[in-house]
Amino acid sequence: MTSSHGILGQSRALKALGCALASGHVHHAWIFHGPAGVGKFRTAEEFARILLDPAATAANRASFQAPRGTACARLIDAGTHPDFHVIRKELAAISESRELRDRKQLNIPLELLRERMLGGVSSSGRQHESGVFRTASLGHGKVFIIDEAELLDPDGQNAMLKTLEEPPSGTTIILVTQHEDRLLPTIRSRCQRVAFGPLGAEEMLQWWQAEGPPLADADRAFVDAFAEGSPGMATRAAQHGIAAWNAELSPLFDALEGGRFPAGVSDRMAEIADEFAKAIVDADDSASKEAANRLAVRLIAQLLGMRVRRALATAAASDNSDALERWVNAGDVLTEFEQHVRSSVNLKHAFGNLVAQWADRVAPQKPSAGAGRGH
């Protein structure tokens, strides 16, 4: 299903939201959850446009297509609508608080929520007005979208509970997340949940034809496989040359899996992550180098995950139990690697451990000395 405003697929999600709008009884708190880059935020914005625009008709609500060209739409397009609020970790870079500005943008802290949404007294003693409880400036409700809501710290999530349970009339809160499991059960229980999934092959083809970046056929085939039904991921992979990462790293991992240990594998992976992060920061003054490093790590992990899935499929097709065990081990190594990075382990150390574990647990085991000899 495609809306005229670019939401591809997600027919179940759009139908559920269209029905809620048509009913006239829209719940006040929502979780839009699913993989990165599949349209969750775009859908949240369209939902907000319909809720906030007094020109929205029953047909707009039923079809889940907000009007364009209205006064409300122009304000949202310009980023100046006083009742439409998007909260992201990057807002810390322009905070009134020096402490927030100096933070690494690895989460959405309570202080940022106080400043942008909840109000209250910050740790520095500054009093913030509650945006949630402020009267709507244009008199047609307020919408707050929290992007990457899984980055809300525990204090922030706990502070939101009362607001999610009893928000003021006309206020809608949407948590957009690709890791719903990192939200507290008490957060999840207060929200209506809408699931988003990866796009199918036909929908991805539509996206490539309408919005996809121009790529050589081989690179496009690789990026399409890497993206796994995520237009957002495909865009990022094309923009940052993930196909080139694959071309460079694949022979190095071939060697590791063959029992050889090429020099400098972990150092090169750390360099790739650093080059990626530097490009992100150079392109956006408000971006955080640490957050960009984390994103690079996720992309490298996804690249290796693609390798693991292909190898598992090959091993299963050939009924090779030894290879299956080794590639299951590879999946475990990747999981441990991502856990290390989330625990703020030094990236070079994390890459070094990944390579060492890959060589130890994925390469075929050599027979021990004397194995098979009679005594």
Image (cartoon, rainbow, N blue to C red):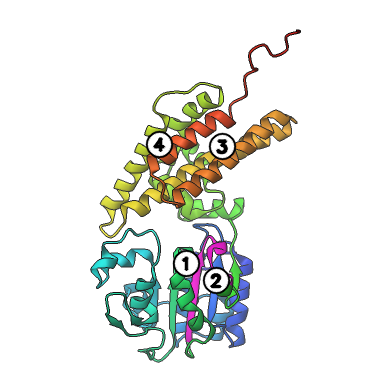
**Residues under labels 3 and 2: Cα distance?**
31 Å
Do the CB atoms of the residues marked 1 and 3 lie less than 8 Å apart?
A: no
Q: Quadrant of the C terminus?
A: top right
178 drawn magenta: yes
Q: Which residue is mark 3?
A: 307
Q: Position of residue 265 (x, y in %)?
A: 42, 30
Dot 3 or dot 4: first in sequence order is 4
Dot 1 or dot 3: first in sequence order is 1
Dot 4 or dot 1: first in sequence order is 1
Q: Which residue is mark 2?
A: 31
Circle nearer the viewer, 1 or 3: 1
Question: In which image quadrant can residue 83 be found?
Answer: bottom left
Q: Nearer the viewer, residue 99 or 308?
A: 99
**Mark 2, residues whose alpha carbon is within 10 Å: few (<14), some, or many (≥20)?**
many
Magenta span covers which residues? 171-185
Q: Residue at x 23, y 68 (%)?
A: 98
Q: Which residue is mark 4?
A: 269
